[in-house]
Image: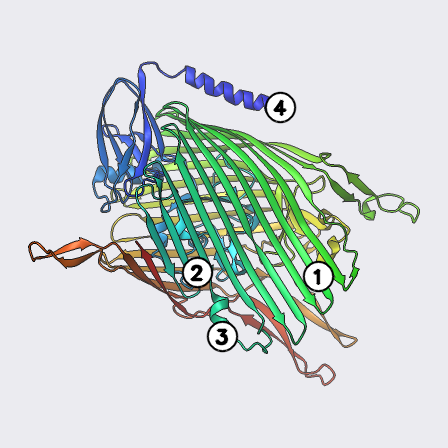
């Protein structure tokens, strides 16, 4: 079946190739940054007389096929000076250009071509963020954070106060596909979720897809966050970094071979442990505590020829929390983090056919180690992936863009491994449980301009998943017949490679755009997704202790269907982009732990025996207004949404709100460039309070207080809102120096640049709720017992300052 599907893809591409007009010729090439030599994603390449063209892909490649003739080709990108090329097209031609950064483009025709993607493309719920703009926004404790910035977008909600975790259109945290240079990230957080692993100094492109996921992405239901690293400056050496209140960053990049090969190395480390150590009494309760995180990004690229380019990239990051007390004889250590590597080869077969092949490795680990006197306890969980992907991009003409590809991933899961010993005695905590699986997919995507008004992006993705041995399967007694002492519960042993359970699924995707007039369009989308990986959690928030596990013969793959409709309109010569999107999503085979499950229940048992399964749905309305050009830029986003869950064994089978259900979510993000030296940033957010479960009644029995909880997530905390503010100061880029020959003063460009970023988080000191707990006062016997609810708030007003430098 899979071979027939791949053969069909090859046949279809061959038919399109054969049908291409022989009287037409192709202009192709790359668009690069003139200062660094890096490729530019999304640069516009179009014919001046018609305004028709195509954007560059992720690797800066473009291809335009036109009838023979003479044309003026325009190359442009926001923030760069445009270039025009006169082309006599009588044969296939390769043209690579370098754009030079300049003033904000104001030419009307250029602005139309730049901003028209909002109404011209079939994209729904797709946003690209500029890293340099993110750096001017208010930063939490001075740390620029990509994942906190995307939470300002409509349809994307923060997990909790200060957290970098996020939920998209009613989906859970495991339903977001997070990629770093094509490698999957399973835990994108530092400091228990308060910071993300993405160092903005090393990031090149950020793309968010929250609706209408195209066929080349899969394995998740809710969204895609695709982050690409910088390739390194191929023209000159450059050093940049920053020193903040809690961390410092340092980045080095430059050419290995000028205009042919380059590298970048970027590192970051917190020094909370170093700064606080002199002020903590070693004899205090927390005297032995320490915490820090660090991460390192690196990338090397080499242009083998005009048609071949090789990229190697890697990431390594760790959080390390430690506690020790000599008085108590107790010590604990909690390290966790990610390691990733990626190798990519780009090959240009012809002016119309582009190949991208990628091999990646991803490793996420969590450990907990504790010792007290002679007792030692260890807990470990993690997931490793080995992946290979290959994608063909074919550009037959201006009306077609075709992508076809195959993906394969080998997963190795360690859901939980526990060991314990006291002195020379080892406790029986069960064998180390590991789960193995294969995941593969083949897809075809065709973006086709059927008419001048109607564009369709249709795709089909076929996916296959297999859970294989070695594996020890424990069949619980309650699902067996005739259980007696002589007939105990069954244990089934699977050998390496044995098939335990598998699934083959087909996922259709389609997005359509109908142009109403030159300034507006209507869009509609339908997507179906299967997700074979699940995140199981015993807590109300996402923590490093959450466990990833695959689909098995018991755990079915999650299945989601999403319908979306939107109206997109630009105003004032495309300076303002607006959209209204509405969506409805259904989700099946969702996973939760059964009520009353404890971590130790997994010893000598399978995790899937303690899971329960249900379904959910969500729907909402998203409004978005964005100003792209001028001194004042930014956006306003508003979401009205609802997300519910139905599990037979939870909440007595009654429907209940998801823990991330949020009726209203408003964000305002603004940046104002006063002049070349001062840039102001501001943000305001308002959100309906989180849904939680609280006790409704308490009983006194035999000297104890027993609680009777209300329906699941039936109580709302107070609304969340706050405002942040920032000022970035850039000293003048030139300095005055006396000319030795003329004696006159002249302005010369500085070789060392620096800036100061001042931020205030939660400027009006809002005490936002983080969680609620209950305390007891008085005595039961005396009849004076009172139970009081208390709200815990994490972050008051927090000023910060960061010094950034570049030379």
Residue 516: horizontal and vertical position, in percent?
33, 34
Q: Earlier in the sequence, mark 4 or mark 2?
A: 4
Q: Which label belongs to residue 278?
A: 3
Q: Earlier in the sequence, mark 4 or mark 3?
A: 4
Give the mark nearest the N terminus, 3 or 2.
Answer: 3
Disc 2 is placed on an element classified as strand
Mark 1 or 3 closer to N-term?
A: 3
Left or right, residue 257 beside residue 661: left
Query: Is mark 4 in CB contact (under 8 Å) with mark 2?
Result: no
Q: Residue furthest bottom?
A: 782
Q: Position of residue 129 (x, y in %)?
A: 38, 47
Q: Disc 4 to disc 3, how far (Cα)?
A: 66 Å
Which residue is denoted by mark 2 in the rendering? 686
- Residue at image mark 4: 1
> Residue visible at 65% across and 61% down?
369
Residue 87's x, y, as percent? 23, 24
User: How far apart are the alpha carbons under marks 4 and 2?
Assistant: 50 Å
Q: Secondary structure at mark 3?
A: helix
Give the residue pinned by disc 1.
377
Within the image, what quadrant is residue 5 found in?
A: top right
């Amino acid at each position: 079946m899979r071979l027939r599907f791949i053969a069909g893809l090859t046949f279809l591409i061959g038919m399109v190739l054969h049908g291409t007009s022989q009287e037409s010729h192709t202009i192709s090439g790359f668009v690069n940054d003139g200062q660094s030599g890096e490729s530019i994603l999304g640069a516009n390449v179009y014919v001046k007389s018609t305004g028709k063209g195509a954007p560059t892909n992720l690797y800066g490649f473009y291809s335009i096929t036109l009838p023979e003739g003479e044309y003026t080709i325009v190359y442009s990108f926001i923030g760069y000076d445009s270039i025009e090329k006169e082309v006599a097209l009588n044969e296939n031609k390769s043209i690579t250009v370098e754009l030079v950064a300049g003033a904000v483009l104001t030419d009307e025709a250029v602005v139309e071509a730049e901003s028209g993607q909002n109404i011209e493309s079939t994209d729904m719920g797709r946003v690209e963020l500029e890293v340099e703009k993110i750096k001017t926004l208010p930063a939490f404790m001075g740390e620029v954070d990509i994942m906190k910035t995307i939470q300002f977008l409509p349809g994307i909600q923060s997990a909790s106060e200060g957290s970098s975790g996020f939920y998209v259109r009613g989906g859970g945290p495991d339903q977001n596909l997070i990629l770093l240079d094509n490698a999957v990230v399973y835990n994108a957080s530092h400091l228990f979720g308060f910071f993300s692993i993405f160092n903005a100094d090393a990031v090149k492109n950020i793309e968010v897809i929250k609706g209408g996921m195209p066929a080349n992405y899969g394995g998740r239901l809710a969204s895609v966050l695709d982050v690409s690293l910088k390739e390194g400056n191929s023209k000159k050496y450059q050093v940049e970094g920053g020193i903040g209140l809690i961390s410092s960053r340092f980045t080095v990049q430059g050419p290995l071979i000028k205009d042919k090969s380059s590298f970048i190395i970027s590192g970051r480390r917190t020094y909370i442990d170093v700064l606080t150590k002199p002020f903590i009494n070693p004899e205090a309760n927390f005297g032995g505590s320490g915490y820090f995180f660090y991460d390192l990004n690196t990338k090397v690229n080499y242009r083998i020829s005009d048609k071949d380019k090789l990229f190697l990239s890697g990431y390594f990051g760790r959080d390390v929390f430690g506690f020790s007390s000599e008085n108590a004889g107790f010590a604990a250590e909690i390290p966790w983090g990610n390691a990733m590597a990626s190798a990519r080869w780009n090959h240009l077969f012809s002016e119309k056919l582009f190949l991208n092949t990628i091999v990646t490795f991803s490793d996420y680990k969590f450990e907990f180690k504790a010792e007290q006197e002679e007792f030692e306890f260890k807990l470990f969980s993690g997931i490793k992936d080995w992946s290979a992907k290959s994608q063909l991009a074919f550009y037959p003409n201006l009306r077609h863009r075709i992508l076809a590809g195959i993906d394969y991933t080998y997963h190795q899961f360690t859901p939980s491994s526990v060991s314990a010993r006291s002195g020379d005695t080892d406790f029986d905590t069960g064998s180390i449980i590991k789960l193995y699986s294969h995941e593969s997919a083949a897809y075809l995507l065709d973006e086709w301009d059927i008419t001048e008004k109607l564009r369709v992006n249709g795709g089909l993705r076929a996916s296959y998943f297999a859970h294989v041995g070695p594996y020890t399967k424990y069949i619980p007694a309650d699902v067996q017949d005739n259980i007696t002492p002589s007939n105990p519960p069954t244990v089934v042993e699977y050998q390496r490679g044995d098939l335990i359970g598998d699934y083959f699924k087909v996922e259709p995707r389609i997005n359509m755009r109908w142009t109403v007039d030159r300034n507006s369009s209507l869009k509609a989308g339908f997507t179906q997704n299967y997700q074979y990986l699940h995140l199981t959690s015993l807590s109300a928030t996402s923590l490093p202790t959450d466990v990833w596990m695959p689909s098995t013969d018991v755990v079915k793959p999650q299945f989601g269907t999403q319908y979306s409709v939107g109206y997109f309109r630009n105003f004032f010569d495309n300076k303002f982009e607006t959209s209204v999107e509405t969506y409805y999503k259904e989700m099946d085979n969702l996973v939760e732990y059964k009520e009353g499950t404890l971590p130790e229940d997994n010893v000598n048992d399978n995790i899937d025996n303690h899971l329960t399964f249900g379904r959910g749905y969500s729907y909402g309305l998203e409004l978005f207004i964005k100003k792209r050009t001028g001194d004042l830029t930014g956006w306003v986003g508003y979401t009205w949404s609802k997300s519910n869950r139905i599990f037979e064994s939870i909440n007595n089978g009654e429907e209940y709100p998801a823990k991330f259900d949020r009726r209203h979510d408003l964000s305002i993000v603004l940046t104002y460039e006063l002049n070349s030296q001062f840039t102001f940033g501001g943000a305001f957010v308002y959100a309906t309070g989180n849904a939680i479960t609280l006790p409704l009644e308490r009983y006194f029995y035999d000297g104890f207080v027993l609680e009777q909880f209300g329906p699941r997530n039936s109580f709302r905390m107070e609304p969340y809102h706050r405002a942040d503010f920032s000022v970035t100061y850039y000293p003048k880029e030139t300095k005055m120096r006396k000319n030795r020959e003329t004696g006159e003063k002249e302005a010369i460009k500085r070789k060392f640049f620096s800036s100061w970023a001042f931020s205030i988080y939660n400027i009006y000191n809002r005490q936002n709720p983080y969680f609620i707990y209950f305390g007891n006062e008085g005595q039961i016997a005396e009849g004076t017992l009172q139970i009081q609810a208390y709200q815990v708030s994490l972050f008051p007003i927090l000023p910060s300052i960061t010094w950034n430098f570049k030379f």
